[in-house]
Image: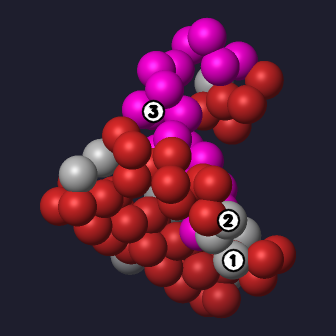
Amino acid sequence: MVAVWQEAPHFFTEREQAALALTDAVTRLADAGVPDTVYGQAAAHFDDEELAQLLALILTINTWNRIALATAKRAGADER
């Protein structure tokens, strides 16, 4: 359901939608950066500490995804 969050907004709270929109924008930084409206929505639903934690989570997940892609690794495929 998370993959189609924009098509099913009634399944998510406004706070969750703000977090998902920020996640999408940060993940697609090369497109145009994080739009002010997206950041503003997130800032309206999260205090500074929560926003920093949310960004840290987004960046961590994006980093692990990029490492996996760069090394052609797949979860659960380690043959050790």
Q: Residue 6: x, y in percent?
A: 73, 31
Magenta-colored stretch includes residue 23 = yes
Q: Which image quarter is the N terminus in? A: top right
Q: Mark 3 points at which residue?
A: 16
Between 65 and 10, the one lying in front of the other is: 10
Left/right of residue 52 with respect to residue 71 in the rendered view: left
Number of numbered discs: 3
Residue 33: mark in rendering: 1
Residue 34 placed where, x, y %? 63, 69
The type of residue carrying mark 1 is Gly
Q: Give the range drawn in magenta.
A: 8-26
Q: Is residue 64 visible?
A: no
Q: Which secondary structure, mark 2?
A: loop
Check disc 1 and report its element: helix, strand or loop.
loop
- Name the residue: 60% across, 47% down: 21
Sooner in the amino-acid sequence: mark 1 or mark 3: 3
Residue 50 appearing in the image:
yes
Looking at the image, do the residues carrying marks 2 and 1 touch, with CB atoms under 8 Å apart? yes
How far apart marks 2 and 1 lie (CA) works out to 6 Å
Q: Do the residues labelled 3 and 2 touch (CB within 8 Å)?
A: no
Which residue does the numbered mark 2 point to in the structure image? 35
Against 38, residue 58 (above or below) is below
